Image: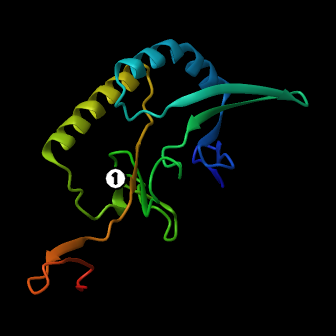
Amino acid sequence: QFSEAKGGGFFFLSADKRYMVKTMSGEEHTALMQMLPGYCAYLRANPDSMITRISGAYSIHMYGQTKYFMVMDYLFAPSQCPEIHELYDLKGSWVDRHAAPNARVRKDRDWSRSLRLERSTAAAMLRQAGRDARFLSENMIMDYSLLLGIHNVVERRCFARAEKGTRGCGGGGGGG
């Protein structure tokens, strides 16, 4: 899979879908190298951070040009999580935040549902998001978003059969 980012860079997944590779400018590469010690320390101190895990940053020089790229752990690697049915790139902005009609990744203005989380989970996520935003701001990174993947689950209800004393499960509005 290969896609072009809005800023002109490119994203693509490794063959096993464990890593995402993103091209970047020389200035972005330099900035990443400068913030790397603080980034590593931050992630060690905040293991629940929602900030992307960068596995490496590289450059390649060919034909008189230098290209820069970074390798990131792919958040939704099939070996690490269930199939993602909906994907949102959330920035907290309403300006130009609609996805194209058949786009795989939706944006802020496409969100039209509630997300139900346990109160303690929601509170912990909000605290961590605040810490992450402060870290990014302190490092002068102002263009970031939350990538949210949703795996839809079909509800199944179990019931006891009074006549036989056995249990059965039904789902999606039917029994059996």
Going 35% across and 65% down the picture, which residue do you hit? Answer: 152
- Residue at the (55%, 13%) spot, across then down: 34
Between 20 and 94, the one lying in front of the other is 20
Name, please, the residue furthest toward the right.
63
The local secondary structure at tag 1 comes to loop
Quadrant of the rendered structure where residue 56 is? top right
Asked where in the image residue 125 lies, by quadrant, the reply is top left
Residue 146: give x, y in percent of width and height.
39, 43
How far from the left and from the top, in percent, is residue 73? 55, 37
* Residue nearest the observer in this picture, 50 or 89: 50
Please state if 39 lies on the left or on the right of 34 as rendered: left
Q: Position of residue 62 (x, y in %)?
A: 87, 30
77 versus 173 height, above or below: above
Dot 1 alpha-carbon crowd within 10 angstroms: few under 14, some 14 to 19, many 20 or more: few
Quadrant location of the N terminus in the rendered image: bottom right
Left-right relation of 15 to 135 = right
The residue under label 1 is which amino acid type?
A: Trp
Of the 4 image quadrants, the one containing the C terminus is bottom left
Residue shown at 23%/83% (left/top)? 173
Relative to 14, residue 101 above or below = below
Q: How is the image coloured?
A: rainbow
Q: Residue furthest front?
A: 164
Q: Count the labels in the image.
A: 1
Q: Residue at x 38, y 52 (%)?
A: 95
Above or below, 125 relative to 159 = above
**Which residue is identified by label 1?**
94
